[in-house]
């Protein structure tokens, strides 16, 4: 009987020691924080590498490490993007955006002087009740009919606009010279109101060439700003002015 009590006591001591070891080991594992991952952010101006910055994943970049990349002689810096075409949805605000992996950012540098754009720009699209019904994605129509879809100069360099009635369900893009090379779709628009316009996709394969679909009837002004020297910097805006000014077709 005494031998049995001694054995039970030994087992109890061993179990207590095992539990203590487990607790200590567990505490040690919890206390050891994983090492922060180091990443590299590369800054580009078109095909030119401006420099790289080493950073810690999930932490803000030190502004002093990249501010020198934002200057340009005889021009203006217009932001960093994760796409070389400056897709609006890929624009990054380095004062608040963080990165979890190696990243390449493309700077939008706008020269003060660019080539004159002499192309003719048009809205091309489709509609069931608005004027885009005869447009039918830049179909073969007369020059007089094309004129109602042409963006005209605003007086500012390489800036063109068109005011047009658009209706729910209409889809459109912007093209030059009534042709589809260099089309400009949803991804080239900045500041779109999601209650008025949405991305309807398309055959181009990217947001830059996706159709814009109208969600709210209205009279809209579409404005295009171009840079023939760097077409990635072409941008579009659309502003709703009022309800449609003409009655839709029955």
Image: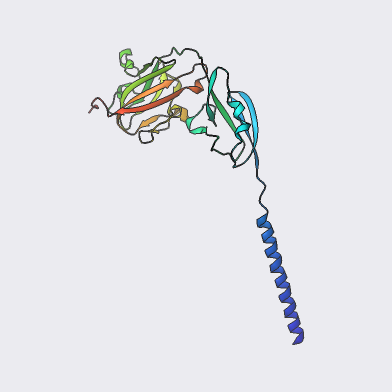
Q: Quadrant of residue 247?
A: top left
Image position, residue 55 (x, y; %)? 64, 38
Q: Is 6 on the left-hand or right-hand side of 68?
A: right
Work out whether residue 206 can be spotted.
no
- Front residue of 124/21: it is 21
The colour scheme used to paint the residues is rainbow
- As drawn, the residue found furthest toward the front would be 64
Look at the picture and state if 110 lies above or below 43: above
- Front residue of 167/140: it is 167
Q: Is 37 on the left-hand or right-hand side of 88?
A: right
Image position, residue 95 (x, y; %)? 54, 36
Q: Quadrant of residue 142?
A: top left
Image position, residue 68 (x, y; %)? 61, 27
Please name the residue shown 60% across and 29% down the image: 67
Look at the picture and state if 11 lies above or below 185: below
Q: Quadrant of the N terminus?
A: bottom right
Q: Is 52 on the left-hand or right-hand side of 189?
A: right
Image position, residue 72 (x, y; %)? 57, 21
Q: Quadrant of the C terminus?
A: top left
- As drawn, the residue found furthest toward the bottom would be 1
- Front residue of 4/180: it is 4
Work out whether residue 214 can be spotted.
yes
Please name the residue shown 63% across and 25% down the image: 49
């Amino acid at each position: 009987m005494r031998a049995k009590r001694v054995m039970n006591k030994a087992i109890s001591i061993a179990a207590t020691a095992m539990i203590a070891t487990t607790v200590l080991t567990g505490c040690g594992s919890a206390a050891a924080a994983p090492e922060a991952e180091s990443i590299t952010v590369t800054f580009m101006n078109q095909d030119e590498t401006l420099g790289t910055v080493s950073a810690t994943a999930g932490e803000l970049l030190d502004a002093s490490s990249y501010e020198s990349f934002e200057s340009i002689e005889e021009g203006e810096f217009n932001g960093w993007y994760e796409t070389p075409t400056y897709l609006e949805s890929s624009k990054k605000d380095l004062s608040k955006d963080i990165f979890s992996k190696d990243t390449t950012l493309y700077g939008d540098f706008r020269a003060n002087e660019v080539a004159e754009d002499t192309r003719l720009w048009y809205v091309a699209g489709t509609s069931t009740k608005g004027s885009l019904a005869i447009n039918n994605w830049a179909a073969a129509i007369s020059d007089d009919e094309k004129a109602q879809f042409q963006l005209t100069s605003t007086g500012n360099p390489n800036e063109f606009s068109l005011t047009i009635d658009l209706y729910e369900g209409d889809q459109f893009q912007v093209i030059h010279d009534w042709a589809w090379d260099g089309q400009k779709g949803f991804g080239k628009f900045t500041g779109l109101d999601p209650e008025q316009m949405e991305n309807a996709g398309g055959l181009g394969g990217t947001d830059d060439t996706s159709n814009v679909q109208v969600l709210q009837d209205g009279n809209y002004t579409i404005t295009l700003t171009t840079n023939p020297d760097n077409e990635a910097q072409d941008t579009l805006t659309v502003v709703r002015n009022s309800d449609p000014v003409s009655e839709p077709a029955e």
